Amino acid sequence: MQKISNYINGELVPPVSNEYLDNYDPAIGKVYSLIPDSDMRDVKHAVESARMAFEIWSQVPAQRRSDILMKIADLIDRDHEVLAVAESIDNGKPVKLAGKVDIPRASANLRFYATAILHFASEAHHTDQAAINYTLRKPVGVTCCISPWNLPLYLFTWKIAPALAAGNTVVAKPSELTPYTAFLLSKLCVEAGLPPGVLNIVHGAGDKVGQPIVEHPDVPIISFTGGTTTGKRIASIAGPMFKKTSLELGGKNPNIIFSDCDFDQAVSTSIHSSFSNQGEICLCGSRIFVEEDLYEKFVEAFVGQVKALTVGDPLEDGTRVGALVSAAHRDKVLSYIQLAQEEGGTLLTGGEEQLSGRCENGYFIRPAVITGLASNCRTNQEEIFGPVVTIMPFTREDEVIEYANSTAYGLSATLWTENLTRAHRMADRLKSGIIWINCWLLRDLRTPFGGMKQSGVGREGGWEALRFFTEPKNVCIKL
Ligand code: TXE
């Protein structure tokens, strides 16, 4: 069986323990590869390598750093097919989605920051006649990047690209549920000639690998994407150590539909924003609010299209909804479908799906649509992170704003209306880091990305990420 390696100091190495964890293919429910069960010893080695490499990498001209990142991006594109299939097998997502979204976005992340760093400038301030101030932006040091399982290579590269472009070195930990494409990427880094120690990838469990990286005194900066509970734990460790921290956490995003919307567009995009990637995207709109006079018509059209979605083998081209990432996550999502009914909701469609043939033991759920729930019940307040949405009617703008803002999260919100004034007014009042109007997940990598409240701390994307991954230093010269 294929054994994944750690990538430390430029070499593909086994874990010190020589122990491995099982890596499941969620579409068939079977172990198909082995993940290093790394521990503190591997982390120490990786941090030490990154610390040594920082002395050199932080001095390498930006153009040279850019060239190497561009080369890695080219290699990702060259291996597009292999990476898309690997991502699909590891995560359960349709291979078509991985090929269209995950893998192209991984190379785009690297290219975006490889070029952004060439244009990144700092400020200067002329203080009347008295002085001139300028800001130096220096790389911070050894960076901890911890990424989740829902968009594995996409989010892994979203973190390492700006960190490396800015001159930091990295110790990264991909999710133990989806380590495979990060392993393939480490081979591409060797091929691209990335100097040893600049990027280190340590595989294994969150508490045995992620936490020791966070706790390490030689790691002054942490970028984390994952669940809010883990984010809280990381913040509680990093806070007293005064580490720079960026946290991208969960969401419970509202999708608000006014009766003056472009109906067909609102229905078809809402299918996409509800169930893309099996609903396992922090930006999915899991609470749909529909203006009363459109409610019946919307529910009928929406449920009709949901029933037509093909749930199936992720490796087949026609599949729209693949497997959930793990048996544990499938069970968590099913328990919420159960809870929704206990809370008085009506399940219009969806639930556990048993496939036959190759995928008979896979972790599948048919997209679920629930109505009849109040906005403040647990189903409508807690992140489910699966193919489950609720639909609720509303009559007034103030009312829907209150529902939308009522959760502990504040990542994204979607609005459907042709009324421009209302769109701007709502965008201003919604407590979310990202507002999409008449669209969803239309991304521009230059924009600030992140959430309010328990959806996180800080912003990634564009200059925000380069500012985060550099330390500003003010220099004041008296004239
Ligand atoms: O994520 P974890 P889990 C949400 C979603 C999901 C829930 C739990 O609701 O059901 O979180 O998912 C590493 N110190 N999101 O438990 O544990 C872990 O190894 C340092 C939303 O799978 O947060 C992995 O690499 N690191 C989210 C990463 O944290 C630790 C995407 C994320 O896993 C650690 C995923 C520790 N003590 C889940 N414990 C999003 N925002 O998109 C774990 N990790």
Image: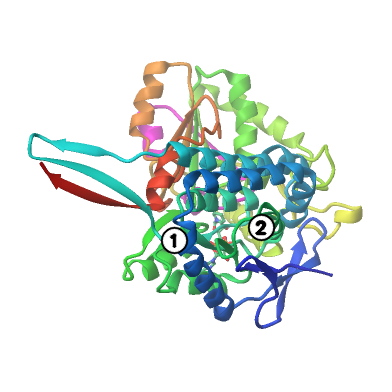
Q: Residue at x 51, y 36 (%)?
A: 445
Residue 6, x across and y down, in percent:
66, 69
- The CA span between labels 2 and 1 is 18 Å
In the picture, measured across the screen, residue 324 lies left or right of residue 170, that is right
Residue 233, x across and y down, in percent:
43, 68
Do we see residue 347 in this rendering? no
| Magenta stretch bounds | 377-404
Up-down: is 120 above or below 365?
above
Q: Residue at x 65, y 60 (%)?
A: 329
Q: Earlier in the sequence, mark 2 or mark 1?
A: 2
Which sits in the foreground, 459 or 58?
A: 58
The image quadrant in which ligand 1 is located:
bottom right
Q: Are marks 2 and 1 in contact (CB under 8 Å)?
A: no
Disc 2 residue: CB within 8 Å of ligand 1: no
Up-down: is 39 above or below 28?
below
Q: Which residue is mark 1?
A: 222
Q: Residue at x 45, y 50 (%)?
A: 166
Location of the N terminus by quadrant is bottom right
Q: Which residue is mark 2?
A: 182
Residue 347, x across and y down, in percent:
65, 44
Name the residue type under label 1: Ile
Q: Residue furthest right?
A: 357
In the picture, measured across the screen, residue 5 lies left or right of residue 354, that is left
Up-down: is 181 above or below 212?
above
Location of the C terminus by quadrant is top left
Determine whether the residue tagged by mark 2 lies in a helix, strand or loop. Answer: helix
Which sits in the foreground, 424 or 148?
A: 148
Name the residue type under label 2: Ala
Residue 38, x across and y down, in percent:
62, 76
Q: Classify mark 2: residues with Cα within 10 Å, few (<14), some (14-19) or many (20+).
A: many
Tell me, yes or no, whether the highlighted magenta stretch contains residue 178: no
Q: Classify mark 1: residues with Cα within 10 Å, few (<14), some (14-19) or many (20+).
A: many
